[in-house]
Image (spheres, coloured by chain):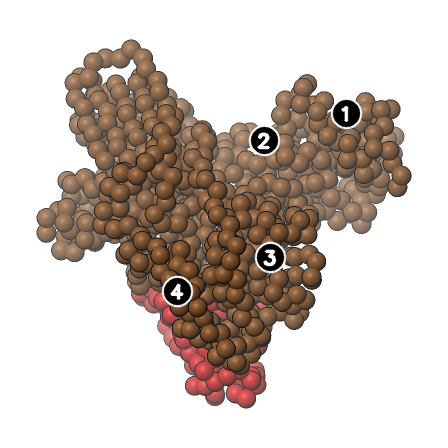
Chain colours: A brown, B red
Amino acid sequence: MNAPLFNPSRRDVLAGALVVSFSLRAIPSLAQEQENVSKPPLPGSLKKAPMLDAWIRIDADGSVTVFTGKCEIGQGVKTALIQVAAEELELDPHAIHLVTADTARAANEGFTSGSNSMKDSASAIRNAAAQVREILIGIAAERLGVAADRLRAQSGAIIGPDNRRAAYGDLVAGNVLHVTAQPTSKLKAPDTLKIIGQSLPRIDIPGKVTGGVSYVHDLRLSGMVHARVVRPPSYDARLQSIDTSDAEKMPGVIKVVRDGSFLGILAEREFQAVTAMHALAAAAKWDIATKLPDETNISSIIESLPAEDHVIADKHAESASATRTLQAVYRRPYQMHGSIGPSCAVASFDGDALTVWSHAQGMFPLRQAIAEMLRLPEEKVRCIHMEGAGCYGHNGADDAAADAALLARALPGRPVRVQWMREQEHQWEPYGPAMVSRARASLDAGGNIVDWWYEVRSNTHSTRPPGAGQLIAARHLETPFTPGPPRPGDQPEGAGDRNAVPLYVLPNVRVVHHLVPDMPLRVSALRGLGAYHNIFAIESFMDELAAAAGADAIEFRLRHLKDKRARAVITAAAERFGWSSWQAAKGKGRGFAFARYKNLAAFCAVAVEVNIEHESGHVRLGRAIAAVDSGQAVNPNGIANQIQGGIVQSASWTLYESVHFEPRRILSQDWSTYPILRFGTMPESVDVYVIDAPGEPFLGTGEAAQGPTAAAIANAVANATGVRIRDLPLNSARVKAAIGV
Amino acid sequence: MITLNVNGRSRDVDDAPNTPLLYVLRGTLELNGAKFGCGLGQCGACTVVIDGKPVFSCLTPISILQGRKITTLEGLGSEDAPSPLQRAFIEEQAAQCGYCIPGMIMRAHALLTANQSPTDAEIREHMNANLCRCGTHMRILAAINRAAGGMHAAGARAPAKAEEEE
């Protein structure tokens, strides 16, 4: 097609709505520029990818494909995205095919993180779907000669008053959906919704419970070989020498790949690769350079390291005079993602271009990092998301993809599958950072908080790509890449300072984030980032203040809270739990906590009961009740599943988990050296009440329970024992010591 | 060549005799159900049923499996025709990432085959060997309880089947 790059006569039309631009790259951006000056911002990720057909494609046969730049990481987002599209397109959800993050097909929505998928992608898809529906109605009106307001969309067709119909597939000729989205859409009214709000069963579960190809781990390509990597014994150890000849002679071995301290082996079958990996590891001689800090002293080390200070809240107003001041220090250890399936990736290099299948959370940033590492142009690298085991943040997925890329480059023409061993995942994943915070607050004579001072000290919470230096393998190459400088994360979402500013209405507030750039252990995003620790600290401190004020924990929170939706989840959780009628007993405690995740996503309140075994100090979560407001609830069962899972996972972090290390190496290498919650100590019940907010924006939910659960458990332990423990985890040894058994 | 009995079929495999069953199931036999989780017998993601007992397939070399009856997730049912236990997991929406679920189902299958009416405490004790990281435990328990109820009913209605198996 010999289309001109710019055709002034088309300008006005394009800025309207309905017109096709062929491959006129200049024109959409021009339309965008015009909108930027005159119109409100586009909803969700439409801001990043404003063309409707970047999100929704309808083929002549009527088949509908929805594209998202986000990925399924076990949170059920595929089902929810299909629901919003089906709702506005008036389709059966099963008629929609969804394509998730793929650099060749989907919009660049960055990372699937921060509980942002519903806000970003579902908002984009819902609005795009509504606009597509209206475009189809407009075309049908012309074709059928009927006014648009007498037409309706139903089951893949536009239907007129006399039952005349035009199928979607017949209306889409000529790229009619290749138009820029409008800032506002004719969304269906809340009381007319039929699919949004239903607990549609997850589309991925039947395959997962019957042995389908559900994960990148299950991908089996023609001619595929298996690989394993041999990692150094510690972060910066360098490979001094290795005799690879024995390993190379082992059955099935294709080749050994070495580049600096990066070492991998390729074999025909997986167990052959594993066996040869062990031989290779035994033959490798390392220069062990890394000095890890003293684990027992880690919080003072974090406090002694230089920091960049960021004042994130500083508000002063007239208030009553203080009669009593409390202060406290809260600490959190390094904790791990601990995916049940070690990281895995498949890569295929044809001598020119590379394709990588990965369960990392951001395909575009991964592509950028891998292209930089291999010194390939970005357009020669395609990254396609496939599911992995739950990641809960930045685990080894990107690194495994880098391993696969390097090994595939060494064997052009044959796809390479690499999976990490359990010990590699435990030792090399980037942990949730150790954190320390100090809180000080004063009460007036009436028991109201008059001033609040809080400072939190933490490493960065993101060492993700796009830089090649963020990838382990790239750092170990003969010509190594170095990681970029640590980033603090911006408010209001924050990172180490996520949820460091309380939602409570307080006259005087000062909050400081001390970002510690030096990272003694490898760290990055773990579900909730700093919110887990900050909510643990703030909500523990609120209980301490309530006790000092002689107030009930819930009444004290409500006393300082205006937000109606916040108050509603607190009241609901307290009622469902039976807070006011709860009976104390020996060894039993109740605890409560609340937060609005990031102060802008879902509202979540958690009430728990714990039972403490006096002799051992073991804390058992007895029951948990949560109330959550996620805005317009798309799939209530999916929301409940996320909150329920978040409570259990956070209970495991809070009661048991801490990464162990010594100067030369990480000691937490498997599930025996990093124990987590098991069935034997599961609560009796974990119940979630979803409060729907029809017509309100979607609010991210996936990480909302992590902080409130930690604080509710800590508060319940204090309630049961009379002793306040401010250091995580609340394991048996610590509780036993605190209660003086 | 070693002959394995997998899901009622005889399968000849040419993997080295010391190869753990997991790699043979996933590689040679192209069965996705059993998952690699730790290779150490600590997490249960690889659980299959051998002669009625739950076994960590990541630790069990095929050399000792000749003549043993191996059942994997695929042996219970398919997406089109899931078994009652698989159906119970779907009905309870008992998965988040789902990676541990095949192992959970196989361990629960061994329990329900041996004991058609386990108590909640028995289920929890039996399942303690398997790890889940998403926190789906409560739904997994609900699914097993649901299947146990369903299996009772099926057992009560179909005594002939039980006699056949004698």
Instruction: Residue under label 4, please give it.
Output: A286
Work out how far the residue at label 2 is from the one at label 3, CA to CA, in angstroms.
39 Å
Q: Are marks 1 and 2 in contact (CB under 8 Å)?
A: no
User: Quick one: label 4 or label 3, which is nearer the N terminus?
Assistant: 4
Is residue A109 shown to the viewer in this render? Answer: yes
Residue A190, labelled with which disc? 2
Residue A337 is situated, as x and y percent measured from the top left of the image, at: 40, 52
How far is mark 1 from mark 3, CA to CA? 38 Å
Q: Chain of mark 3?
A: A
Residue type indicated by callout 2: Pro
Camera-nearest label, 1 or 2 = 1
Marked residue nearer the N-terminal end (1 or 4)? 1
Q: CA distance from mark 1 to mark 4?
A: 63 Å
Q: Are marks 4 and 2 in contact (CB under 8 Å)?
A: no
Q: Residue furthest left?
A: A741
Which residue has dot 3 on it?
A357
For image coordinates 52% across by 38% down, the residue present is A116
Q: Residues within 10 Å of mark 1 (few under 14, many from 20)?
A: many
Q: Which amino acid, mark 3?
A: Trp
